[in-house]
Image (cartoon, helix red, strand yellow):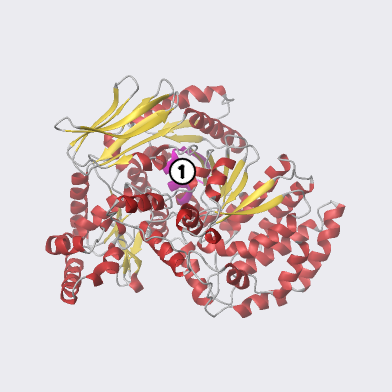
């Protein structure tokens, strides 16, 4: 049986690019004993699959995410996972409305359920919010790094890094008490057992919140953040920002941390716009304004009020903006602030953007200004504080001289905070939340105020041991020192450190330099090496994996979308992730307006080469390895000759870059040493070379006009294919291979 490479159908710019790239991939791999299969895990696809009971038979689709969730537990898994939308509630609502307009009889999303039926609908839709995809697929730990050709390209074509102002006022602000960092408790389960999470009020009334099955040696942890302290922190930070006369910016992750962080985001709105709630609290409640969904939620619901009330609210907003510090803007031209939508500013991409921009953000008038970088919880904020202070002291990083930071991330089996969604609770009254083992002993106990954010999370022993092994192997392969970013003052990390100390000696570590450091110290150590042009491996937990694999690649090569991301699955298969999609919405916006797509598919190219090599091990023909090696050489030429997509209409875009990838790939296969492959690809290489100008002209000819693809979340695929394959000449050459 042929091995199968699963290519995921997802959202936004990489979704569009798939319609141009996948036919090329199918053509070039056709005769090498491997199947290429497309599986839909897009936001729209997940909604349709999840809500199947509301749909007629002809509109139903299979639950492809559930299928892939089972596949990753098998040795034959070989998946190329492109970036999908980690949907916020506003995005979910927009996707539902679009599907309804296309004839899908889906129920509206009930923000405030009024009965059991609406409660059920909300729970079903909750499966589509946030990062529901990644935890299902990540049945292995993460190996993320920049491929050598990508790093060399950045040195030869350095991206712009703005220098900070002299005496920059930009700084990181974080809580100093009563946050998740301070309140963490942790224990290691001595056996397989079922834990109970219980709320008990001050009168002794108890409520079972959840039962959780844990395995022997699983590290189970919990913490909470006090909301009153959070709001006091926001008030103080806003006041301090006003005094410094700089921009106020908030950086959380309300998409991945879809239960806890929207509330932290909402509290920033409750504090910044306090006068609005003081004056119009009753009216805001009547129209169902939910601050957790951002100020855009108010804009969407404001017309439910009488005109005079609407005007009074708008006037109050103007007064608030005049009184409070200026807000960091997502889009100053459109008046979209940092507090507009929870999915607009995502910490792992937004702080690197500020760093690239000389520690500055865009203000309301389109000006560039210093800013307060607000990261409420200390756990990882101090790491960001360290790099910001380093830049203020030592200047901006030079992409032509800096080293590299690779990452080995502990993420298998819904590890740590990203597995906390179903174990996050808000106590209805003052009281206690505790975790009780099967002996009735309280292994974790917290006293909380009503409304505080309590969350539990864990990491399985098999995942930790695999992580340590992966870190040791990466260090041996690269020769770089490995730093475990673990803080002995955190209860969870202290338990992880015990495992690292136990596990590392099992491997040949004589030539491995390794350190265990708290994140701020690890950052300091790493930056010293980074500025000297040296390489370092960061071995981190799940959240820091996410943050650092955006931060350092963005500094090194301008984008994290070019990162090689390999997940060796615990069962023996492979998951190959193609980099971040944070810029994807902007790319789609330009595409719809101008039919020019500047998404760079380099991440897909790199992932495909690794996936094809795995396919060889899984039983594909010998030719597949030759094809993969030729692809890697083609990618090196693609970068060396700078055939990456450019920003403006008339310049090379994603479709033109795919042409060059195909041209270089065919030329490499035409001289690969395998007579059959050479005979197949020599005429292809000749045709592509002879028709280069004609093909590029056909692509350019299509540009400059709006592209109507029939939807944003669920486009018409015939239209997408038409727009993404505009060159008849190129299509004929590729389709002949398929």
Which residue is located at x 71 percent, y 51 percent? Answer: 35
Q: Is residue 712 above or below residue 426?
A: below
In-image side of 279 versus 588 (left or right):
left
- Residue 278 in percent (x, y) is at 12, 60
Write down the region rendered in magenta: 532-550
Which residue is located at x 16 percent, y 66 percent? Answer: 323
The reply to whether residue 487 is visible in this rendering is yes
Q: Residues within 10 Å of mark 1 (few under 14, many from 20)?
A: many
Judging depth in this view, the residue of 187 and 42 nearest the camera is 42
- Residue 518 in percent (x, y) is at 38, 35
In-image side of 452 versus 219 (left or right):
left
Residue receiving disc 1: 545
Q: Hey, which quadrant is residue 247 in on the image? A: bottom left
The reply to whether residue 275 is visible in this rendering is no
Q: Quadrant of the N terminus?
A: top right
Q: Quadrant of the C terminus?
A: bottom right
Judging depth in this view, the residue of 78 and 475 nearest the camera is 78
- Residue 332 in percent (x, y) is at 34, 70
Judging depth in this view, the residue of 103 and 151 nearest the camera is 103
Q: Hey, which quadrant is residue 188 in on the image? A: top left
Which residue is located at x 31 percent, y 32 percent? Answer: 197
Q: Residue furthest left?
A: 279
Q: Is residue 596 above or below residue 462?
A: below
**Callout count:** 1
Q: Secondary structure at mark 1?
A: helix
In-image side of 156 versus 134 (left or right):
right
- Residue 621 in percent (x, y) is at 78, 45
Magenta segment: does it hold 414? no
Magenta segment: does it hold 539? yes
């Amino acid at each position: 049986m042929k091995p199968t490479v699963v290519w995921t159908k997802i959202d936004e710019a990489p979704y569009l690019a798939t319609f141009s790239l996948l036919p090329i991939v199918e053509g070039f791999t056709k005769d090498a004993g491997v199947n290429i299969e497309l599986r839909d895990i897009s936001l729209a696809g997940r909604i349709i699959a999840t809500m199947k009971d509301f749909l007629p038979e002809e509109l139903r689709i299979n639950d492809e995410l559930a299928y892939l969730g089972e596949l990753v537990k098998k040795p034959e898994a070989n998946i190329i996972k492109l970036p999908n939308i980690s949907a916020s509630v506003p995005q979910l609502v927009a996707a539902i409305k679009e599907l309804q307009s296309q004839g899908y009889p889906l129920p509206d999303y009930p923000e405030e359920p009024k009965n059991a039926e609406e409660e059920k609908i909300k729970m079903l839709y909750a499966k589509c919010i946030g990062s529901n995809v990644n935890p299902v697929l990540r049945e292995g730990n993460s190996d993320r790094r920049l491929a050598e050709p990508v790093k060399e390209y950045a040195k030869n074509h350095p991206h712009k890094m703005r220098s900070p102002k002299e005496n920059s006022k930009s700084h990181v602000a974080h809580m100093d008490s009563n946050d998740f960092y301070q309140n963490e408790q942790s224990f290691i389960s001595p056996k397989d057992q079922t834990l109970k999470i219980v709320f008990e009020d001050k009168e002794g009334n108890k409520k079972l919140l959840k039962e959780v099955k844990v395995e022997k040696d699983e590290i189970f942890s919990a913490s909470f953040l006090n909301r009153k302290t959070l709001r006091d922190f926001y008030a103080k930070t806003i006041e301090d920002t006003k005094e410094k006369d700089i921009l106020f910016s908030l950086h959380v992750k309300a998409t991945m941390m879809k239960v806890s962080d929207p509330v932290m985001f909402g509290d920033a709105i409750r504090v910044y716009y306090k006068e609005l709630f003081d004056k119009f609290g009753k009216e805001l409640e009547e129209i169902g304004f939910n601050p957790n969904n951002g100020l855009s939620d108010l804009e969407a619901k404001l017309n439910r009020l009488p005109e005079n009330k609407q005007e009074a609210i708008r006037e109050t907003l103007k007064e608030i903006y005049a009184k409070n510090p200026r807000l960091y803007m997502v889009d100053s031209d459109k008046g979209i602030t940092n507090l507009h939508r929870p999915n607009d500013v995502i910490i792992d991409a937004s702080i690197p953007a500020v760093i690239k921009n000389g520690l500055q953000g865009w203000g309301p008038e389109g000006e560039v200004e210093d800013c307060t970088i607000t990261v409420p919880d200390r756990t990882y904020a101090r790491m960001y504080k360290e790099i910001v202070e380093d830049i203020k002291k030592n200047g901006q990083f030079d992409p032509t001289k800096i080293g590299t930071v690779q990452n080995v991330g502990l993420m298998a089996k819904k590890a740590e905070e990203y597995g906390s969604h179903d174990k996050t609770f808000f106590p209805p009254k003052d009281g206690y939340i505790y975790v009780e083992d099967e002996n009735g002993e309280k292994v974790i106990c917290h006293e909380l105020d009503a409304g505080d954010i309590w969350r539990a999370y864990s990491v399985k022993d098999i995942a930790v041991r695999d992580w340590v092994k992966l870190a040791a192997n990466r260090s041996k392969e690269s020769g770089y020192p490995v730093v475990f970013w673990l803080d002995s003052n955190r209860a969870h990390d202290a338990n992880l450190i015990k495992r690292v100390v136990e596990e590392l000696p099992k491997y040949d570590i004589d030539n491995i330099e390794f350190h265990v450091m708290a994140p701020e110290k690890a950052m300091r150590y790493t930056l010293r090496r980074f500025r000297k042009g040296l390489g370092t491996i960061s071995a981190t937990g799940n959240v820091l994996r996410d943050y650092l694999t955006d931060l350092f690649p963005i500094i090194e090569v301008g984008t994290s979308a070019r990162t090689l991301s390999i997940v060796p699955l615990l069962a023996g298969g492979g998951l190959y992730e193609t980099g971040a999609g944070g810029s994807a919405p902007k790319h789609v916006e330009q595409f719809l307006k101008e039919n020019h797509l500047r998404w760079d598919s380099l991440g897909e190219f790199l992932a495909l080469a690794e996936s094809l090599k795995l396919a060889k091990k899984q039983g594909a023909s010998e030719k597949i390895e030759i094809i993969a090696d030729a692809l890697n050489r083609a990618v090196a030429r693609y970068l060396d000759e700078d055939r990456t997509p450019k920003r403006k209409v008339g310049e090379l875009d994603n479709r033109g870059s795919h042409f060059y990838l195909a041209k270089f790939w065919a030329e490499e296969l035409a001289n690969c040493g395998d007579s059959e492959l050479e005979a197949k690809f020599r005429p292809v290489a000749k045709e592509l070379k002879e028709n280069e100008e004609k093909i590029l002209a056909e692509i350019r000819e299509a540009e400059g006009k709006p592209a109507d693809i029939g939807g944003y979340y669920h486009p018409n695929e015939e239209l997408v294919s038409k727009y993404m394959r505009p060159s008849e000449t190129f299509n004929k050459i590729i389709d002949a291979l398929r």
